[in-house]
Amino acid sequence: MPANLTPAYFEAEKRFREAKANQDKIAALEEMLAVMPKHKGTDHLKADLRRKIAKLTQASERKTATQRASMVLPKEGAAQVVIVGLPNAGKSQLVDGITKATPTVADYPFTTQNATPGMMEFENIKIQLVDMPPLVSGSTQFWVPPMLRRADALIIMVDLSDTPLDQLVEISMQLEELKIGIGEKKSEEEAPGWTWKKALIIGSKLDLPEENGTAEADLQALRDEYKGQVPVLGISAKNGTGLEDLRLKVFEVLDIIRVYTKTPGQKPDLNDPIILERGSTLADAAEDVHKDFRAKLKFARLWGSGKHDGVMVKRDHVLEDGDIIELHI
């Protein structure tokens, strides 16, 4: 049976052949389906067009997933901490002042368009700080939510010279839209599908409000917003005020420990610690050294949190920051 295709169909078919992007091809195919005469003579053609649409849709989804994955920065160092805030909050100036990264720093908003990582040194480890584009309601780029969810912690930055509490409320609302929570963790029943993050609230540009004597009051208001559950620190990246305290506070918020290993008869390497969550056991440390060590571990000797240096400890011994372990398998 002849298909009796219309001029509108052939025009859409021409656009399909000329299209370069998958979405344009899909749009042309859908138009071809819409203007195609509806009778038995077009049944096979309809099925063919639907198969092409399905194939192009799958290809587009794979491409989007690849793009999303490529935009999410791999973690480096002891942990990854992502910095979020409204436009012109001072995120880039902080990363510029405390790491060796060189993000664009300017007095106008939206100077940061991509994720810019930098390594912050704390004693003998490095922590990755990531400068992000500003949070703007309704304009969050597709790769930002997975970056926030994968991060080990968030730094929420507000400008102390411009109604900081209002900024914090706005940022909190935008995080809630993404189902990302900070502060007191709710149950899965109360907040299904949410991700809860360790967080530190930073009041930037401390040098500006101090002139009017409002800095401490603003910082206290920020603490009160989360009932003291999220630590708050004031800094000035411009003159360096509070940056050393910030290094320590980030380490404390991450709630991680450094554990060192040694081989019998040798000194430990104190420059390359194992990074573990606080509360980790000797068995966890053994697995971090090598995935097979957890099962093969017979015992270990411990220097640090044991009652005596070199004391023999069991697999379930909870380690502390600075412990030195000698594994025997």
Image (cartoon, rainbow, N blue to C red):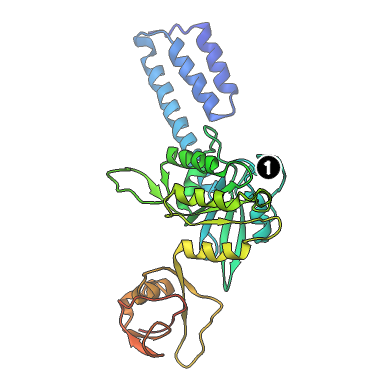
Asked whether 132 or 44 is in front, the reply is 132
Asked whether 168 or 163 is in front, the reply is 163
Farthest bottom residue in view: 265
Residue corresponding to mark 1 = 111
Is residue 57 visible in the rendered image? The answer is yes
Q: Which residue is rendered at x = 65% and y = 44% of the image? A: 112
Farthest left residue in view: 189
Q: Position of residue 96 (x, y in %)?
A: 68, 56
| Residue neighbourhood size for the residue with mark 1, other residues' Cα within 10 Å, grouped as few (<14), some (14–19), many (≥20) | some
Report whether 329 appears left or right of 114: left
Report whether 186 appears left or right of 225: left
SS of the residue under disc 1: loop
Q: Which residue is rendered at x = 48% and y = 15% of the image? A: 31
Q: Quadrant of the C terminus?
A: bottom left
Report whether 66 appears left or right of 280: right
Q: Quadrant of the N terminus?
A: top left
Locate residue 41: give its quadrant. top left
Q: Which residue is rendered at x = 51% and y = 43% of the image? A: 168
**Amino acid at dot 1:** Thr
Q: Position of residue 204 (x, y in %)?
A: 62, 51
Is residue 62 visible in the rendered image? The answer is no
Q: How many marks?
A: 1
Q: Position of residue 238 (x, y in %)?
A: 70, 55
Q: Position of residue 290 (x, y in %)?
A: 41, 74
In the displayed structure, 298 sits above or below 95; it is: below
Asked whether 159 or 299 is in front, the reply is 159
Asked whether 326 or 86 is in front, the reply is 86
In the displayed structure, 313 sits above or below 257; it is: below
In the displayed structure, 6 sits above or below 87; it is: above
